[in-house]
Amino acid sequence: MSGTYNPYENMLAVLEDAAGRLGLTRNDYITMTQPERELTVSVPVVMDDGRTEVFQGYRVQHSSSRGPCKGGIRFHPDADLNEVKALAAWMTLKCAVVNIPYGGAKGGIRVDPANLSKNELMRMTKRYVAQILPIIGPEKDIPAPDVNTDGQVMAWIMDAFSMFKGYTVPAVVTGKPLDIGGSLGRVEATGRGAMLTLMSYLEKVGKSPKGMKLAVQGFGNVGSIGAKLMREQGMKVVAVSDAFGTVYNPEGLDIEAAIEYAAKNKKSLAGYSENGLKVISNQEFWSLDVDVLFPAALENQINESNAGSIKAKIILEGANGPTTVEGDKILNEKGVTIIPDILTNAGGVVVSYFEWVQNLEAFMWEEDYINQNLGKIMKRAFEDVWGICQEKKVTMRMAAYMVAIKRVVHAKKLRGVFP
Ligand code: NAD
């Protein structure tokens, strides 16, 4: 967990507020306050030098009320049970906001993958799969990429699961490379969904993206692709911050060149240069005079220490849980619009859902078809959230939680409590 904030408490605070506004009793939503299942595992790995290291791993299934559990796997030195629990709950809410037939889960290993060789990483991933094997599978719980995991890691997960089954099971995991059952459009899906959500919002408020200034925190899958697609809409990406530093160019960064640079430099922008570029501090980054801030790194990044100095009028939450409850309050008081994570970054799980359906059908869809359907689902979800936001005079975060909780509680009611 980053900082001293507890993301699970953050999630619970908003959940309870939203449930209250929906007129739900505690009895209606009590099952949503705790995950259905939490698994903590030890992951021993024989390192390249012969030593054995043991890493701590987690898989949390928050809810299966609306369908099989779904959620990414994160490799990060700060990963812990509270973080994974919060991320699992947000997955339940996210899948409900976009109305796809999934519940929510998340996994993680407490490790800095930068310190492992490729072979060590592969052995760790495969052993982790062995440890969580009883609770994952195409009908049970389907992992996907998250921070510091990518298509290669998903390929190892698919392989380990398949070896135990004795046959290849592509639908056990999404975000796979294309050659082993991945979906066209999946790599771009989260960034594309974020761009589409911002465009829906700008259309509602009668603003054009052309010339709008954007600052992006995190330059991985979500941040870099989101930045590229928003630039294609005419926005100017003036700053990018990653784990290694922050670069600023008031004239707009050359995002394609930055992406190419990071791809060749262990996903880092350290040392990147172009005409007009300045290196700035983390503090300067948050207080830049931009129109849109796109946090796309980790949770708790916008909190009471920096929310007051934020000048952006729109926060587009690409990361999960980037804003603390305190940060949220300060921004709301300042009249900043926050387009919430469970809506903004849902494009990834939508195309993951398409990938899973394609795997189950053993059929591959065209990229245009995928992007069109992603667009339809993101638009519908935005309209659902916007409708509640206007009708109930609540923030978009509250509206998104209300849309999601209503759907999860309804599913729960239809099914009844077992036994
Ligand atoms: P990634 O590993 O591809 O990229 C993470 C980026 O964040 C890297 O550029 C890293 O340098 C940067 N970063 C890490 N710590 C930082 C710090 N302290 N300050 C600034 N930058 C920092 O991860 P990703 O898949 O792009 O995920 C980013 C966020 O989006 C996470 O919150 C994740 O849960 C969320 N998300 C991802 C997806 C997906 O499909 N990948 C879907 C939905 C939500």
Image (cartoon, helix red, strand yellow):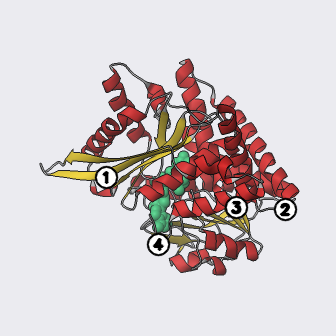
| Label 4 secondary element | loop
Observer-nearest residue: 97 or 179? 97
Which dot marks residue 56? 1
Depth check, mark 3 against mark 2: the one in front is 3
Q: Position of residue 127 (x, y in %)?
A: 28, 39
Name the side, left or right, on which 75 lies relative to 289: left
Observer-nearest residue: 50 or 29? 29
Residue that carries the numbered disc 4 in the rendered image: 4
| Label 1 secondary element | strand
Residue that carries the numbered disc 3 in the rendered image: 17
Q: Could you classify mark 2 by the number of other residues whose Cα lies within 10 Å: few (under 14), some (14-19), or many (20 or more)?
A: few
Q: Of the residues under marks 4 and 1, which one precedes in the sequence?
A: 4
Q: Could you classify mark 4 by the number of other residues whose Cα lies within 10 Å: few (under 14), some (14-19), or many (20 or more)?
A: few
| Label 2 secondary element | loop
Residue that carries the numbered disc 2 in the rendered image: 393
Q: Amino acid at mark 2?
A: Lys
Quadrant of the snapshot with the C terminus: top right
